[in-house]
Image (cartoon, rainbow, N blue to C red):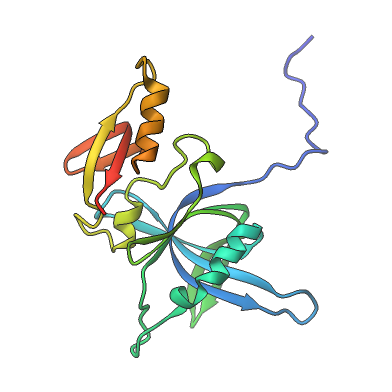
Amino acid sequence: MSNDTPVDESDRFINLIAEGLAYVNEVREVQPKRSKPFTSVRLSAMHGRKGELEYTKFDLVCRGREACELMKRHADAVNAKDGGGKRRNKVVARFRAGDLYADKWLFQGKPQACIKGRLILVTYLAINGEVVFHQPRDEQAEGDNPLPGEVAASNGGNDGAAEVADIVELRKDDPEFVARKEQLKGGGYRFQRRFRHGETDYQNVWVKFAA
């Protein structure tokens, strides 16, 4: 009997999920004529090496309750502009989005494109370098903390924007692993799965940022 028999997936829904770090460009309330109003968020998600970042545009409908409340609460900071129309604040978020699809259109004769979908979760938000929201660690899997560079990115990505006070390596085979882990947490250290400081790349370290 062959093991290559196709599996019937007709009764299952497979979602496409994206997670990343992005500048929050706009938070707006949309009021369709024939349906309920909803909150929409425009993001510029970052990818690539530091100094060579590229951006992918997302236009997302808020669906996660906490994510919606967070975006609404800080909408004024996101949308604030100076007299020249430039954004006053740099707002950075770590986000998770689903139900993704590509959308394209013409604007003044030029092709435009973005990824549309639903904003499911926001686990981190910083405004001009100040962290205003960070999902409690006990509500995340270990290591699901702000991505390396989040604090620096919220300050515009400048070197030294996130000054490091200390870096601690803690191995799971350490006899006092649990006790030391709790001590680091209590001391304000954050677990980083991948972290770059200066010219050195670290993996699975605990980092304390300067106040």
Task: Using the image as rendered, state which of residue 29 and residue 135 is in the foreground.
Answer: 135
Task: Report whether residue 123 is seen.
Answer: yes
Residue 144 % position (x, y): 47, 40
Please give left or right for residue 59 compared with residue 146 in the image: right
Tell me the residue at 48%/34% (across/down): 142
Task: Using the image as rendered, state which of residue 197 and residue 14 is in the foreground.
Answer: 197
Please give left or right for residue 70 compared with residue 169 in the image: right
Identity of the residue furthest to the right in this view: 11
Task: Report whether residue 118 is seen.
Answer: no
Task: Using the image as rendered, state which of residue 210 and residue 31 is in the foreground.
Answer: 210
In the picture, the quarter occupied by the C terminus is bottom left
Identity of the residue furthest to the bottom in this view: 83
In the picture, the quarter occupied by the N terminus is top right
Tell me the residue at 19%/55% (across/down): 159
Residue 181 % position (x, y): 39, 29
Q: Quadrant of residue 70?
A: bottom right
The total number of labels drawn is: 0
Q: Quadrant of residue 100?
A: bottom right
Q: Is residue 109 above or below residue 206?
A: below
Tell me the residue at 36%/53% (across/down): 150
Q: Quadrant of residue 73?
A: bottom right
Residue 88 % position (x, y): 35, 78
Residue 15 % position (x, y): 67, 45
Identity of the residue furthest to the top in this view: 1
